[in-house]
Structures are given as C-alpha cells and as structure tokens.
Image (spheres, coloured by chain):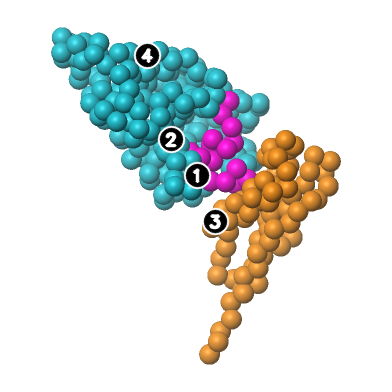
Amino acid sequence: MARFYFDSGERDLTFEDEIGVECAGLGEVRRAGFEGLIDLTRESLKSVDGQQLFVEVRDENGDKIMRLSLLLRVKLLK
Amino acid sequence: MANHDLVREGDRPVYSFVVLDGLVGSTKHTGEGKRQITSFFVAGDIPDLHGLHLSVMDCNFTTLTPARIGFMRHDTLRSICDQHPRIATSFWRSTLIDAAIYREWVTNVGRREAYTRMAHILCELIFRLRSVGRIQDHVADLPITQAALGDALGLSTVHVNRMLQELRRSGLIATSGSKVHAMDWAGLTHAGDFDATYLHQRNLADQW
C-alpha cells in the first residue's frame, strides 16, 4: 500500500489534497480517482458549455501519475 | 479491534450488546457489495436492543475503532423489563431515539450537500460523545478511517478528504492525527445544518 494524493479542480483552479488515500496499485488509484470525479461532478458541474473538471493524482514523491477529466459540451442542434 | 463484525445480518442473537468504549456502526451492503454505514453508536448505546423483539438481525454491527463491548442475555433483559417497567420504558425510549437518528441520517445522506453532510456528522459525533461525558470540550478522538466516513456519508474517499480540508480552511475544525477539534462550534453547527433536537438529550442542549 502506498499513499496517493488526489488533487481536484476546474480548469486552472486546483484544490490540493493534503491528506491522501492509501491504495494498492494503479487499479485502485484509478477507481478512487474516478469515484472522486463523480462526486466532484455531482457538486460542481453547471450547465456551462466547455466546463472542465478533473482529478489529478500524485504519488508520495510528488510525481503526477494519473489525470481523470471531464469536459461538458452543450450544443444547440436546431 | 476495528472492523470486527459483532452481529451479522441474518443472525438470531440471544444477546444484545452495549458499547463501553469506542465507536460501532450499523452497516448494510448493497447487492454490489457497497457498504453503507447507517448510524454510529458511542459509549452507553445498546445498538441491537431491537433484537430483543425482532428475532432475525436485518443489518450488521461492526466496530469502527478499537472498542470494548458488554453482552447482555435477552432472557435476562426480558425479566428485568418485566420486573422494572421504568427500565423497559427507557429501553423503548432508546430504540425510538435510534429511529430518530436514522431519520436524520436519511435526510443527511439523501438531501444535504457533501460539505454540510460532513459538518453535520462531525457535530453529531462531538455532541453525542460530550453528552455521555467522553469529551469535556469540542475535541473528539475519532480514529475512524476516511473510507468509513465515506461509507457513512455516501461519499468517495477522495471527496471526504476534500470536504475535511474545506472545513479546515473555513476555520471550523482543526485536525491532528485522529483528533478533530471543533474550533468554532456555532459555525460548524450552522455549516452542518445541525439541530440536536433529534438526539433527544434532555436538558443538555441548553449547555452548548
């Protein structure tokens, strides 16, 4: 098990994770990041075309190892 | 030890237990195996008192921190209730308060935003621990995992971290190891939409 830090945010605004989560391997990191992105989306997604939300994962050395992001597209079709 | 199942769903216990120390949670699992903690129990609580009248347990009771537990035989409890109506009444009252707490938790998990939800659960824990004399001020030792907090709040561990940090940045709490200090009790109750009425602690609410 190692500790990973899940920073999150919107475009250039990053909320830094100071606590971290213990994960066993990249599969668990991805699952934790994905679940975090779902919660972030539920709370922060507005009806704004082009809005981007992300979770970016650092390891204990501070190296970025994964980024999960969402981009909202709203298009009038008629 | 933590994460020890004291009673499991489907059990037909002949005992009820009382929490002497530590924190216990009632838990349910979805078909997919996701855990929801449906309530916390602190020292003095008898979490499975309903087992006295409902023979098959419909949830699990699990230690969330190292805990000390006492067991009481159902037949003994029944004869105590038969001989002492006031004790029977206070047992009944205790299960009614449990139901009130479950109602509050449904509201908390179902309708409050994550930040409010987190503040609410911290207020409840601090209030209850203080009510039973386990803490004197607004500092609670809560050695529960972020995953357990997430299971109680219906939130991911990553979001639990985010909310704890937001509460810290707002100056409402300070954390040190497993200790949570409510720095601004009035602010925390406001942030958590917390009104202690549902805990039905006679005369205690006035002292806060």
Please tell me the numbered disc located at residue B34: 1
Q: Please tell me in which quadrant of the rendered image residue B78 appears.
A: top left
Query: In the rendered structure, which amino acid carries the disc numbered 4?
Result: Phe
Q: Which residues are magenta?
A: B143-159
Q: Which residue is mark 3?
A: A43
Q: Distance from label 4 to label 2 (Cα)?
A: 19 Å
**Image location of residue B79, percent across then percent down:** 19, 11
**Image location of residue B49, percent across then percent down:** 30, 23
Q: Which residue is mark 2?
A: B27
Describe residue B41's horizontal placement relative to residue B14 as left or right: right
Q: Which chain is orange?
A: A
Q: Which residue is mark 4?
A: B71
Of the numbered discs 2 and 1, the one sitting upstream in the chain is: 2
The residue at 40%/20% (across/down) is B131
Q: Chain of mark 3?
A: A
Of the numbered discs 4 and 2, the one sitting upstream in the chain is: 2
Both labels 3 and 2 in a single chain: no
Q: Distance from label 3 to label 2 (Cα)?
A: 25 Å
